[in-house]
Amino acid sequence: MKKFFIILLTVLCLFGCSKKPDKSIPFELETYACDMSGYEGMDARKHMFVGTTVKELERTILEKGYGVFVLSRTGCNHCQMVMRYLNEVAEELDVKIYYIDATSEEYPIVGTDNYELLFDLLYSTLNTGKDGKEIQTPEVFTIVEGKITSYKIGTTWKGSEYDDNDINELKALYRKMLTPFA
């Protein structure tokens, strides 16, 4: 009986641990400086986000790269709440986050082929709405060796009411997601 539990515990540890990216293999994306002042509590230039595109997300997957990504939009209430706390954790751990702006005019997504591409790339993580799978924001996800290894859509609470415990729970989740990239 003890051997069974030891084997079970070993298996759980092997499969339950976060996979870390091999940072000895540099992986850089084409990025742009993003102005985050549209998000409450965020400074225009002092943050851990770098803008990137859906095409670069695709390249990350195809080339078996790695990184932390967030799909967000300033007009989303949950995005407004999340981005500040995600940035705090990223600063604490010194982790760069690739920001995909869902409403970018320079790199449009909605109404373009980029939307279908994004839908296909994130399909396994998407929630099901009344009309089937749908892209929702904010979505924070990590990629290691071209595979999505963790993701969180929205917040850890429902609606717009939240308290310090909810914020701490969300930050703890982000800390767990970002730690392998620190």
Image (spheres, grey):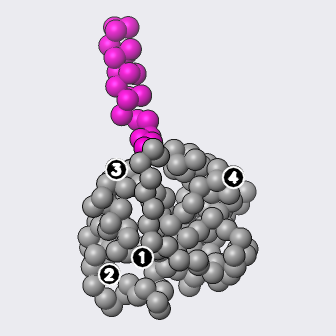
Place of residue 171 in the rendered image (x, y in percent of width and height, measured from the top left) = 63, 54
Circle 1 Cα neighbour tier, 10 Å, few/some/many (<14 / 14–19 / ≥20): many
Disc 2 and disc 1 in contact, CB within 8 angstroms: yes
Kind of element beneath mark 2: helix
Circle 3 Cα neighbour tier, 10 Å, few/some/many (<14 / 14–19 / ≥20): some
Disc 2 marks which amino acid?
A: Asn
Work out how far the residue at label 2 is from the one at label 1, CA to CA, in angstroms: 9 Å
Q: Is residue 14 magenta?
A: yes
Work out how far the residue at label 4 is from the one at label 1, CA to CA, in angstroms: 25 Å
Range of the magenta residues? 1-22
Q: Is residue 44 left or right of residue 67?
A: right
Q: Give residue 145's mark.
A: 3
Foreground pick, 36 / 33: 33
Tell us which disc is closer to us: 2 or 1. 1
Work out how far the residue at label 2 is from the one at label 4, CA to CA, in angstroms: 32 Å
Kind of element beneath mark 1: loop
Q: Which residue is mark 1?
A: 53
Please say if 15 is above or below 153.
above
Foreground pick, 106 / 167: 106
Task: Say whether disc 2 or disc 1 marks the residue closer to the N-terminus.
Answer: 1
Q: Give residue 114's mark.
A: 2
Disc 4 marks which amino acid?
A: Glu
Work out how far the residue at label 3 is from the one at label 4, CA to CA, in angstroms: 24 Å
Disc 4 and disc 1 in contact, CB within 8 angstroms: no
Disc 1 marks which amino acid?
A: Thr
Foreground pick, 164 / 176: 176
Q: Which residue is mark 4?
A: 92
Q: Residue at horizontal 34%, vertical 25%?
A: 11
